[in-house]
Image (spheres, rainbow, N blue to C red):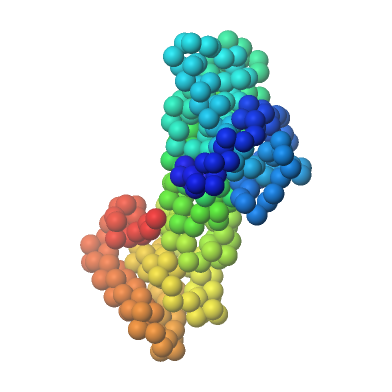
Amino acid sequence: MSRVLDSETATSLKKGDALTAFRAISDVLTLPSEGLLEIEILGKSHILEDGQYVLKDGLAVGVSKLGLVQAFMVARQQLRRQLDGIKPLPDDDLFAATAVILLFDPEYLTAANARKRLIQSQLSGCQRDARARLEREKRFVDSLLTSRLHRHTKSPTLWSHRRWLLGLFASLGVSVDVVREIRDVVSVAGERHPRNYYAWCHARFLMGSGRDINLPAVAAEVQAWCFQHYTDISGWSFLYFLLDAESITNKGSQCPTFTEVLHLVKSLRLTNESVWVFLRTVAAAGLAGEEQYAHFLEAQAAIFENSRLSSDQAVLRAALEWCETYRQNIRAHPVDTNSLSSQPTAMPSKT
């Protein structure tokens, strides 16, 4: 939600009850739930009754934009008094205030840090309910990251807070289901905000945080997502990351994913840069066999011949030239493919 208010909204702030708005919105954010909330900020097209600030249907929550601004002003004042030592808040009230603040502004680092300190204090005082407390916080953060809130899905502050939470889970010996995390959080955030660099970087973090990760299952999940969002370079970049990791234990074998992506490209005659950057990188890195590389050349030639736009032809020509250059270099001077994946030219990320 933008912090810039139009004149009509600014005038409307003088109406209504800010404290009532704060209580209504904070209640829906802090009450326990069995799943992730799907939050949406309601604009002018949704006219609510006087004194109504929230619409709720199961896990779907609609929050009045005007009410959220009023609630934020109350929450910010409460947090400031807490930090200044003027009026310390009970734990539940501090969680409520910071929840409203982060819904309004996901980059409000002071609010995120206040929650961290409070959670650490609670964990040091009572280990018995530690996991339940962390799971509740994770549901709140994941609700913000996966809802239709444009700034939240790509918020470095929220993704950093989530990594911190997973670190606490690990300290308690609690592992996470990486496939489920990527499917239910990362992929959804990636869909809400295309080319979501922060979400897919978090996916890389997840791959390094688990003990027994089912790499083929993760790759299958991500491949399915990429097929549905084939213009998203961030998803393809992460898929290459997975294939490169998998090739360490399957050196010299064919890459089924490469064949399946080629089939998709040929059937839909795709010329977008994202998918061709993926194909050229897999081919150049030696993850595809000689027969697969021949199919890559055939697909590129066929689609190039049928392409009528100069921009599409430029993409196809660049993919072939780049691939041939780096593939020849690798064959002449073999290197660890991990070093290629770390180079900016291997799989650029577009934000």
Taking the image as shown, residue 74 lies to the left or right of residue 277, namely: right
Q: Nearer the viewer, residue 310 or 315?
A: 310
The percent position of residue 25, horizontal first and vertical second, equals: 65, 33
Check the image and name the residue furthest to the right: 58
Relative to 66, is 288 on the left or the right? left
User: Which residue is at the front of the view, 13 or 254?
Assistant: 13
Q: Residue at x 54, y 32 (%)?
A: 72
* Number of disc labels: 0
Residue 107 quadrant? top left
Q: Relative to 272, is 181 above or below?
A: above
Vertical placement of residue 83 versus 98, above or below: above
Q: Relative to 338, say whether 33 is above or below.
A: above
Image quarter in which the C terminus is found = bottom left
Residue 54 in sight: yes
- Image quarter of residue 178: top right
Is residue 260 shown left or right of residue 330? right
Q: Position of residue 142 (x, y in %)?
A: 59, 39
- Which residue is nearer to you in this view: 9 or 120? 9
Going 55% across and 80% down the picture, which residue do you hit? 267
Residue 91, given in percent of the width and then of the height, sits at: 59, 16
Q: Residue at x 63, y 26 (%)?
A: 19
Who's the residue at 29% across and 56% down the image? 344
Residue 195 vs residue 108, the one in the foreground: 108
Q: Is residue 218 visible?
A: no
* Residue 34 on image: x %, y %: 73, 36
